[in-house]
């Protein structure tokens, strides 16, 4: 089999009316290299209904085409196109004839074009449509990789290598390779399969071979067992990968060779020890992540996903949850290499829709094929430890929802019995009709002798003295927990939780300890939680063995659901709704890390709560907002920046936040003590100091038992504003799956950052193009495809994509600053 990238040589446009085509008024095609997001270049619409959901990007219909030559020698072979993701309702034609379709915008799918292609020139045409159907920014078009498979008559199936490690001991591991062989010829064929396993260092450690007879049209499965001495195990801290090479010999001739990487690791699960990997309990420090890549939109270019995993791991996370769709292959590859665990999530909707044109319209017909595709693709990735069959599915509180949950869970187990199954259940949504009914105004009852009806159904669960539904909750988080802890949720979700290996709970921390009594065998995972309450959640995780971990919403900020994490100032001219941002808001604003990869203060706070950072951390609330009333939801962190450069506010009041796990912290301003305050676990790992801003330095000193344990400081940027540009890697591969990220900042001569907005322009020369440019500004009308963008808090990022081998020059300019240039060397991969 030959498998080659099919990403080059495409063109796209907004779909043209065929009558306009005849009249010569058709929209022209533009050249693109896949992966490509057709939505990110659209003009945003401030009047779009529910525009905050999609960051005010409108829907549309797009068409792609590609002309390619098929050599004469390949024309009679099996020709298969592999699409890793097309958003959405993809319809594929080859040489004008229908070839296939896929409703899901996230499913990997195969199109067999064998009977449609011919020797010489061929044309493939792909339509994709976005019905404004997303609850977040989805992107549009062919946004993930495309591959071309040309298969011999007798060949390995596209997903024909599956590796299991059923027995692992320190001295020996059993590695089973399940090989599926397909015979498309008209004759019975006997072939030989040879396998070799190499360790992380490339040393051959095991091999095997077998003869297999394959009947026409009937795939043959062969299982080869290998025995690896003293195996190098895969884990979060030591992500050691082995490789299996499978060779297929037909009539003594090598007809196909393929390699698959895998990890040798053992998973165990029980309520007494939680999740164990290779016998060691692992608590999941989890980040929910959406699929978009910030300033390049939804385009899943491999390096962008790899960089996200690198930054998330440095920030203290050891697990991600793909929200709410199957994670990209590129991100799984990165998680395998870097040691990041994965919850691979399949669906956001089952039979009940959440949007007018959502995935529920196709669920009943396509759910099995979508699950089969996801698991076939992801089986060999050691990073995947759980499959999630859904996110906040309303049906989970109904008997029919229990039936669907069982169907999905059993289908997953039939496809892959080596992982565990969860479902991210929101208790309030599961009983929402009951809640709505009970919250309706009730007519004054006639006098009765019998006792009045009570809210017994919504009474707290065992050990919880939370108020009933008719009591005003302090905020959305308390409301969710109050309802989620109720007896009606206990009863109505029992079946849906009962079909799972792990009870995934969204905003249901009130159940963590009570369910230990109610359901002694229930293992719980916080599949989605509020970022502002991580100290409380993590305490529950550490104190309860049956609680596996916590997944914050979100680890990385994302486009769409605009403004759910913002602070709302009611006195502003257009304050917007409490849980959404008015135009031009475009990001959710709730990520530990912003869309450019810059860590926000919440990220450092989380690192301290996890026990991974000894030094304190300082964040300063924007002095321009001092004294103003602010309303924040449960996803909103304070409006603070790690900077002491507030030149326009000399002598004016400012609030300094300090995070630390020590007993107390002291704050110094220009070496003058402002005082000491208690901090640490009993004070939610944070404190604040009210002081006056003065240029110079601010320092936090942490003390435990009166002894200094660490310090952290910020200095004011002074003097002329200078441009600084730093590239994440000076050498990259000269192929379109790689990227160079150029981090741009406004600094002084000592490198201290100015908190300032200034328009910067990026020019790319040599074999590269500007893929996108932007900042973490949550509300801007500037566009990401533009070469000019304003900094936000003194920061911006430019993303450069290679178009060939050679030196790529990236020049950054801004008014009043000397230009700076970085050089990226794009080299041909070996």
Image: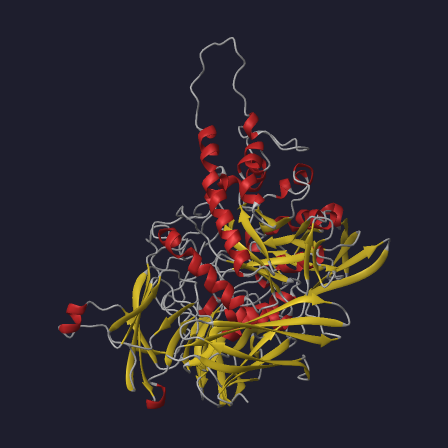
Can residue 565 be seen here? The reply is no
For the residue pair 315 and 10, the one nearer the viewer reads as: 10
Q: Is residue 378 left or right of residue 282?
A: left
Residue 342 horizontal/vertical position (percent): 59, 62
| Residue farthest to the left, as pictured | 23
Query: Which colour style is shown?
Result: secondary structure
- For residue 538, above or below residue 558: above
> Residue 346: x and y, percent?
49, 57
Q: Position of residue 116 (x, y in %)?
A: 29, 77
Q: Residue 104: x percent and y percent? A: 39, 60
Quarter of the image that includes the C terminus: bottom right
Is residue 431 or residue 752 the one in the foreground? 431
Q: How many marks?
A: 0
Q: Quadrant of residue 379?
A: bottom right
Left or right of residue 7, residue 699 in this image: right
Answer above or below: position of 366 versus 219: above
Query: Between residues 350 and 653, which one lies in front from this camera angle?
Result: 350
Q: Is residue 64 left or right of residue 287?
A: left
Front residue of this view, candidates 709 and 491 = 491
* Quadrant of the snapshot with the N terminus: bottom left
Is residue 11 visible in the rendered image? The answer is yes
């Amino acid at each position: 089999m030959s498998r080659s990238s099919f990403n080059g040589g495409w063109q796209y446009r907004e779909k043209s009316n065929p009558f306009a085509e005849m009249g010569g008024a058709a929209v022209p095609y533009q050249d693109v290299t896949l992966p490509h997001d057709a939505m990110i270049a659209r003009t945003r619409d401030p009047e779009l209904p529910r525009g905050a959901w999609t960051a005010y990007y409108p829907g549309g219909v797009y068409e792609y085409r590609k002309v390619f030559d098929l050599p004469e020698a390949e024309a009679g072979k099996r020709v298969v196109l592999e699409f890793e993701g097309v958003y959405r309702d993809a319809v594929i034609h080859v040489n004008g004839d229908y070839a296939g379709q896929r409703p899901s915008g996230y499913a990997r799918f195969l199109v067999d074009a064998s009977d449609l292609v011919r020797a010489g020139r061929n044309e493939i045409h792909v339509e994709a449509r976005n019905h404004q159907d997303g609850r977040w920014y989805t992107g549009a078009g062919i946004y993930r990789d495309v591959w071309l498979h040309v298969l011999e008559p007798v060949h390995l199936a596209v997903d024909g290598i599956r590796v299991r490690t059923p027995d692992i001991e320190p001295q020996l591991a059993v590695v089973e390779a399940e090989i599926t062989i397909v015979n498309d010829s008209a004759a019975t064929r006997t072939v030989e399969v040879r396998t070799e396993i190499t360790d992380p260092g490339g040393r051959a450690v095991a091999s095997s071979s077998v003869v297999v007879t394959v009947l026409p049209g009937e795939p043959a499965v062969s299982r080869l067992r290998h025995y690896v001495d003293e195996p190098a195990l895969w884990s979060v801290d030591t992500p050691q990968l082995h490789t299996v090479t499978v060779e297929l010999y037909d009539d003594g001739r090598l007809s196909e060779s393929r390699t698959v990487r895998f990890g040798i690791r053992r998973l165990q699960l029980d309520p007494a020890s939680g999740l164990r990997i290779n016998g060691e309990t692992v608590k999941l420090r989890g980040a929910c992540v959406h699929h978009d890549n910030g300033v390049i939109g939804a385009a899943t270019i491999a390096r962008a996903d790899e960089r996200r995993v690198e930054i998330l791991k440095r920030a203290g996370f050891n697990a991600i949850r793909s929200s709410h769709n199957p994670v990209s292959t590129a991100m799984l590859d990165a998680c395998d290499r870097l040691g990041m665990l994965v919850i691979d999530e399949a669906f956001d909707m089952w039979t009940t829709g959440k949007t007018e044109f959502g995935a529920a319209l196709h669920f009943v017909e396509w759910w099995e094929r979508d699950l089969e595709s996801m698991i076939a693709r992801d089986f060999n990735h050691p990073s995947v430890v759980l499959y999630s069959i859904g996110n906040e599915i309303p049906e989970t509180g109904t008997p029919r929802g229990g039936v669907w949950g069982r169907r999905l869970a059993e289908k997953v187990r039939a496809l892959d019995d080596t992982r565990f199954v969860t479902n991210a259940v929101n208790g309030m949504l599961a009983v929402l009709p009951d809640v709505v009914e009970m919250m309706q105004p009730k007519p004054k009852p006639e006098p009765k002798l019998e006792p009045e009806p009570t809210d017994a159904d919504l009474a707290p669960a065992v050990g919880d003295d939370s108020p009933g539904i008719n009591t005003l909750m302090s905020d959305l988080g308390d409301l969710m927990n109050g309802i989620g802890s109720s007896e009606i949720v206990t009863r109505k979700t029992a079946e849906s939780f009962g079909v799972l290996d792990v009870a995934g709970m969204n905003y249901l921390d009130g159940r963590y300890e009570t369910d230990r009594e109610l359901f002694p065998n229930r293992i719980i995972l916080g599949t989605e939680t509020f970022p502002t309450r991580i100290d409380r959640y993590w305490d529950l995780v550490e104190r309860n063995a049956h609680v596996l971990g916590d997944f914050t919403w979100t680890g990385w900020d994302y486009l769409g659901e605009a403004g759910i994490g913002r602070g709302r100032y009611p006195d502003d001219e257009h304050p917007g709704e409490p849980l959404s941002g008015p135009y031009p808001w475009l990001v959710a604003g709730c990520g530990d890390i912003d869309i450019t990869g810059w860590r926000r203060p919440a990220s450092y706070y989380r690192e301290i709560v996890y026990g991974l950072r000894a030094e304190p951390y300082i964040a300063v609330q924007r002095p321009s907002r001092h004294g103003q009333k602010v309303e924040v939801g449960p996803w909103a962190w304070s409006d603070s920046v790690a900077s002491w450069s507030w030149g326009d506010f000399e002598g004016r009041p400012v609030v300094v936040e300090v995070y630390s796990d020590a007993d107390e912290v002291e704050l110094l301003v220009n070496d003058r003590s402002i005082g000491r305050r208690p901090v640490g676990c009993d004070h939610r790992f944070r404190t604040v100091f009210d002081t006056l801003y003065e240029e110079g330095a601010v320092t936090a000193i942490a003390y435990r038992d009166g002894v200094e344990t660490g310090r952290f400081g910020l200095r004011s940027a002074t003097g002329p504003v200078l441009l600084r540009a730093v590239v994440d890697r000076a050498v990259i591969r000269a192929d379109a799956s790689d990227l160079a990220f150029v981090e741009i900042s406004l600094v002084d001569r000592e490198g201290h950052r100015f908190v300032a907005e200034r328009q910067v322009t990026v020019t790319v020369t040599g074999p590269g193009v500007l893929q996108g440019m932007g900042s973490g500004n949550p509300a801007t009308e500037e566009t990401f495809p533009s070469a000019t963008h304003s900094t936000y808090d003194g920061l911006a990022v430019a993303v450069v994509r290679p178009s060939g081998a050679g030196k790529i020059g990236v020049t950054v300019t801004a008014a009043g600053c000397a230009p700076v240039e970085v050089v990226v060397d794009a080299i041909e991969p070996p």
